C-alpha cells in the first residue's frame, strides 16, 4: 500500500528511559516494547506492553507490530520508524517487518539506552579507583554520571555503589 500520508509518533529523544518500563517487585524483566504499523490509522508508533506475563493486548487486523529491545535509544527508534515510513510511502513495504528491522538493528548494543550498572561497568576498574587512586565513592558516582546523558541512563546505581564500598572495605581489610 503506497501512501504519502503516513505519520510517525516520535519518541521523546530527551528521555533515555522513554522506552523502558519495569514493574519492581512484580516483573523480573522490563516490559516488552514494540513498533506498531497501523494501516487503518496510517500511523507508526511505539508501544510498551502493560500486561505482566502473557500479553493480552489485541489490535486490529491491520496493525503489524514487532519487538524492539526495551530501553533502546529513542533517537535510534525514531530513525527506524522514519525508515519504515519511507518504505510504506514508496510502496516498498512488504509486511516483512522483521526483515526490515534486522537491516537496521546492529548485532551489538550500540543502540541501547538503559543499562544496569553491574552489566555496563567493570567493577574492577572502579575498585582500582577506590584502592589505588585514592578516589572516593562520590568520584565513582561522578564517573558513572559522566557516562550518562540525554541518550543513556543507568539502573541500580545505589546498589552498585554499595556493593563497591563493601568490596573495597573487604579488600582493604
Image (cartoon, grey):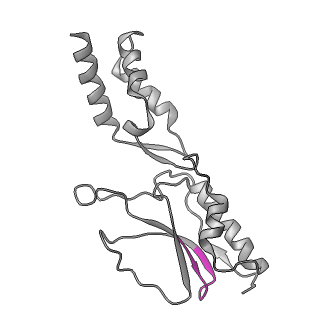
Q: Position of residue 76 (x, y in %)?
A: 61, 55
Residues 42 and 163: in front is 163
Report the label total.
0
Magenta run includes residue 40: yes
Residue name at image x 62 percent, y 65 percent: 101
Magenta run includes residue 86: no
Residues 136 and 171: in front is 171
Query: Quarter holding the C terminus?
Result: top left
| Residue 113 in the image: above or below residue 122 | below
Residue name at image x 41 percent, y 16 percent: 129
Q: Quadrant of residue 172?
A: top left
Residue name at image x 61 percent, y 79 percent: 43
Residue name at image x 26 percent, y 29 percent: 162
Q: Position of residue 1 (x, y in %)?
A: 72, 87
Q: Position of residue 111 (x, y in %)?
A: 57, 50
Main SS class of the magenta portion in the image: strand
| Residue 90 in the image: above or below residue 24 | below
| Residue 4 in the image: above or below residue 147 | below
| Left or right of 20 in this view: 169 | left
Q: Single out the residue that lies furthest toward the right.
A: 90
Magenta residue span:
35-44
Q: Position of residue 66 (x, y in %)?
A: 53, 71
| Left or right of 141 in this view: 161 | left
| Residue 69 in the image: above or below residue 162 | below
Amino acid at each position: 500500500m503506497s501512501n504519502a500520508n503516513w505519520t510517525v509518533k516520535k519518541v521523546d529523544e530527551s528521555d533515555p528511559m522513554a522506552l523502558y518500563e519495569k514493574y519492581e517487585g512484580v516483573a523480573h524483566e522490563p516490559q516488552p516494547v514494540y513498533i506498531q504499523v497501523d494501516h487503518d490509522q496510517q500511523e507508526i508508533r511505539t508501544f510498551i506492553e502493560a500486561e505482566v506475563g502473557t500479553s493480552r493486548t489485541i489490535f486490529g487486523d491491520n496493525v503489524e507490530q514487532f519487538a524492539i529491545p526495551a530501553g533502546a535509544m529513542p533517537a535510534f527508534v525514531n530513525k527506524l520508524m522514519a525508515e519504515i515510513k519511507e518504505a510504506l510511502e514508496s510502496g516498498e513495504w512488504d509486511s516483512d517487518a522483521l526483515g526490515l528491522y534486522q537491516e537496521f538493528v546492529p548485532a551489538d548494543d550500540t543502540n541501547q539506552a538503559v543499562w544496569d550498572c553491574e552489566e555496563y561497568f567493570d567493577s574492577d576498574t572502579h575498585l582500582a579507583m577506590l584502592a589505588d587512586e585514592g578516589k572516593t565513592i562520590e568520584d565513582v558516582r561522578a564517573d558513572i554520571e559522566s557516562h550518562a546523558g540525554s541518550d543513556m541512563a543507568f539502573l541500580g546505581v545505589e546498589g552498585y555503589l554499595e556493593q563497591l564500598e563493601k568490596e573495597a572495605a573487604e579488600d582493604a581489610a
